[in-house]
C-alpha cells in the first residue's frame, strides 16, 4: 500500500488544459508582478487599478484627476483620519466616499476610501470586498471571484 502511495506522490500532477485556467463568467482576471495583484477598476466611472488593504486607497494625483474630471465631488470628501500602512507607519490622510466602484462587471456603492501620497500604488481594499457576500482569490488561476 505504501509503495503505491510513494509512486503516486513521486509522479507529477496531471496537467490541466490551459482553457480550464482561463477566467470563467463572473471571475476577474488578475495580473501579477510576483508581489501584488492588479485588476482593472472603475471609480465613479473613471478608470483605476489594484488589490490589498483595509480600505480602498487612491493616490493624491489620481484623486486630483478624478476631482478635475468631476468624478469626485466636494460632497464625497469626509474629512481626515489616521491610517497605518503595511510597514507600521502612521499617516494622516483624507477620507472620502466613492459613490460607485466597478470591477469586472461587479458594482459596489458607497465605498470608504483614503487618499495616499502622490504616485502611491492604488489598493482595492476590504471596504470594497466586504460589500459582497463572498470573495476569493484563486492564486493558482490568478482570478478574483466575487459572490453576489
Image: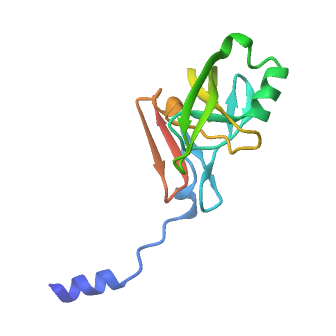
Residue 108 can be seen in this image: no
- Horizontal and vertical percent position of residue 36: 60, 54
Query: 37 or 74: nearer the eye?
Result: 74
Q: Is residue 62 left or right of residue 133?
A: right
- The colour scheme is rainbow
On the image, the x and y values in percent for residue 96 come to 63, 21
Q: Quadrant of residue 120?
A: top right
**Residue at left offset 49%, top offset 35%:** 126
Q: In this view, does 102 lie to the left or right of 7?
A: right
**Residue with the most extreme top position:** 75
- Of all residues, the one furthest to the bottom in this rendering is 3
Q: Which of 53 and 2 is in front in this view?
A: 53
- The number of numbered badges drawn on the structure is 0
Residue 79 lies, in percent from the top left, at 62, 18
Q: Which of 46 and 145 is in front in this view?
A: 46
Residue 36 seen in render? yes
Q: Taking 101 as reference, is 110 above or below it?
A: above
Residue that protrudes farthest toward the left in the picture? 1
**Left or right: 41 with respect to 134?**
right
Q: In which quarter of the image is the C terminus?
A: top left
Percent position of residue 37, x then y: 60, 51
Instruction: Specify the quadrant of the image occupied by residue 71.
Output: top right
Q: What residue do we see at 52% from left, 56% from top?
A: 141
The N terminus, quarter of image: bottom left
Q: Dividing the picture into quarters, in which one does residue 70 lie?
A: top right
Between 81 and 47, the one nearer to me in the picture: 81
Amino acid at each position: 500500500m505504501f509503495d503505491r502511495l510513494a509512486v503516486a506522490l513521486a509522479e507529477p500532477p496531471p496537467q490541466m488544459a490551459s482553457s480550464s485556467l482561463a477566467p470563467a463568467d463572473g471571475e476577474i482576471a488578475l495580473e501579477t508582478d510576483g508581489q501584488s495583484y492588479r485588476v482593472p477598476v472603475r471609480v465613479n466611472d473613471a478608470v483605476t487599478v489594484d488589490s490589498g488593504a483595509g480600505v480602498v486607497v487612491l493616490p493624491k494625483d489620481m484623486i486630483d484627476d478624478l476631482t478635475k474630471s468631476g468624478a469626485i465631488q466636494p460632497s464625497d470628501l469626509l474629512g481626515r483620519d489616521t491610517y497605518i500602512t503595511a510597514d507600521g507607519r502612521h499617516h494622516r490622510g483624507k477620507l472620502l466616499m466613492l459613490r460607485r466602484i466597478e470591477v469586472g462587471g461587479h458594482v459596489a456603492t458607497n465605498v470608504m476610501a483614503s487618499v495616499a501620497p502622490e504616485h502611491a500604488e492604488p489598493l482595492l481594499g476590504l471596504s470594497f470586498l466586504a460589500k459582497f457576500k463572498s470573495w476569493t482569490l484563486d492564486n493558482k488561476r490568478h482570478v478574483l471571484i466575487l459572490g453576489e
